[in-house]
Image (tube, rainbow, N blue to C red):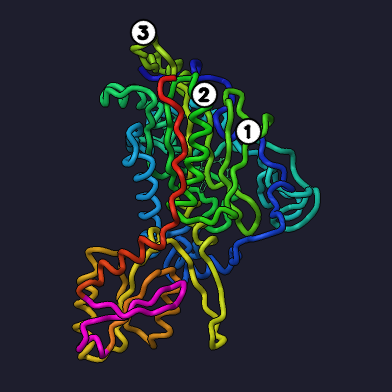
Amino acid sequence: MLGSDHRAPTRAPPRRGRIRRRPSERRLDAGLSVKANLEILTSLAKRRGFAYPSAEIYGGFQSTWDYGPLGVEMKRQIRELWWRSTVQARDDVVGIEAAVITNPAVWRASGHVDHFTDPLVDCLECRARVRADHIEGGVCPSCGAAGRFTEERSFNLLFRTYVGPVEEESSVAYLRPETAQGMFVNFDNVLTSTRRRLPLGIAQIGRSYRNEITPGQFIFRTREFEQMEMEFFCDPSESLAWHRYWKEERLRWYREALAVPAELLRLRDHGAEELAHYSGATADIEFRFPWGWGELEGVAHRGDFDLRAHAGASGRQLSYFDPEREQHVVPHVVEPAVGVDRILIALLFAAYDEETDDRGERRVVLRLAADVAPVEVAVLPLSRNERLVPTARAVWDELRPHFRTQYDDAQSIGRRYRRQDEIGTPQCVTVDFDTLDDHAVTIRDRDTMEQDRVPVPGLVEALRTRIEASRPQAGPPVEAPARGG
Ligand code: ATP
């Protein structure tokens, strides 16, 4: 049975209802920071094929970006690493893929139709529309004028569309603003079809859409983005312990799977005034962006708010039958939620480095972990000499099934190393005239710039060993709460 407006909860919805940090708290503390600013990174991203302004030949489109060949490889790796650690490597999480456009009753019940709003004001000087909570010191972020704004009003962030041929109120539907509701409305289906017991996590990766008032800062905030969210359903008595566990576990993932330096990450527990009324605890994992600490991921304790809201609006029972206590329980939910695009921009900032080599030449290096680098191994013939090319291509053929590779024979070898450094390729394999006699190649390391001669027959293994050695050392696992107690 479908929900209807009069049965939808009138309480504030999960996310936007909360109070945001004061501007002063967003600023950087003194100390270690990232080396690139937004302009440097955006220009590198475009020049090398990570991301381009969308529809650039038509002048672009409002802070919208299209991903290029390197960007898509990196995004695939980020998703893959998240899915592996959040779903496949665990015994208590399964995955789903829900529809982007679904029954609008979902968004009425979740509170998004009525409450998914940001506070909007217009600058009386330049007419720019800005988010009231993004104004620092009363100054318009667009023109710099002080203190001249219209009254604050609420702006709903849902994208509306029409389903079917007739554009009328009854055919209005919404593009999903988060993937999370797909897990709540499928809770009973997943529980029944998998015959699982609590705790049980349901995970999903997919696009979400929000009509953000002020998108910007490259891919940090866009209107179309990709989320990786997991709803961890557990017994209410265990939910605070699971929340503590997931905060640490997710922080560990950034340090160990993505090799983000610990000093660029922090966990920030929300104060009581920031918590939604139903939430026992919420924390953000923040990254030190050049403009200050910013949210990378939220780890929210959502209590039983969503299941109860959907049970109320749909008339379906959304609970778990605990066989030991022989009673129905409405689980509590802990939700780690992050954006793929947001991780990508954070990784680029964390990796960006500039240095001057022995000969005084400037080198830009992206020190990306091999597991997220768009290219793991580049094959570079010393020249385009016709004797070298077949051997170099044969080496490339051998590596392609095992690694993300690129073959580059344009310009001098020095320039090609620089190009690979700039896109974060950890290893370059150079094929030279000696290769024709000794069947060996040179591996050049991105970070140390050291070179090693390695026989072609053992090349795959040698590269694998180097990638393995470059991974951060795994620390002790985060201890999970005892199950069922
Ligand atoms: P914000 O306060 O920055 O608007 P939020 O707290 O509303 O974000 P959530 O709803 O908790 O964000 O979304 C979970 C995650 O999804 C965020 O931590 C972020 O990584 C990502 N995300 C949210 N909105 C956007 C967006 N407009 N563009 C890119 N990523 C986003």
Say if residue 164 shows up in the picture. Answer: no
Looking at the image, is mark 2 or mark 3 nearer the viewer?
3
* Left or right side of 153 for 313: left
Give the residue pinned by disc 1: 18
Residue in the picture at 61% in, 24% down: 277
Looking at the image, is mark 1 or mark 2 nearer the viewer?
2
Residue in the picture at 47% in, 18% down: 308
Q: What element does badge 2 sit on?
A: strand
Mark 1 lies within 8 Å of ligand 1 (Cβ measured): yes
Q: CA distance from mark 2 to mark 3?
A: 22 Å
Tally the numbered discs. 3
> How many residues crowd mark 3 within 10 Å: few (<14), some (14–19), many (20+)?
few
Give the residue pinned by disc 2: 303
Q: Amino acid at mark 2?
A: Gly
Q: Amino acid at mark 3?
A: Glu
Q: Amino acid at mark 1?
A: Arg
Of the two numbered discs 2 and 3 on the same chain, state the one appearing first in sequence: 2
Task: Please say whether residue 329 is one of the residues in the magenta stretch.
Answer: no
| Quarter of the image where the C terminus is located | top left
Give the residues in magenta.
Answer: 433-456
Q: What element does badge 1 sit on?
A: loop
Q: Which of these two is toward me, 92 or 482?
A: 482
Of the two numbered discs 1 and 2 on the same chain, state the one appearing first in sequence: 1
Q: CA distance from mark 1 to mark 2?
A: 15 Å
In this rendering, the answer to whether 452 lies above or below 50 is below
Task: Please say whether residue 441 is one of the residues in the magenta stretch.
Answer: yes
Q: CA distance from mark 3 to mark 1?
A: 37 Å
Give the residue pinned by disc 3: 326
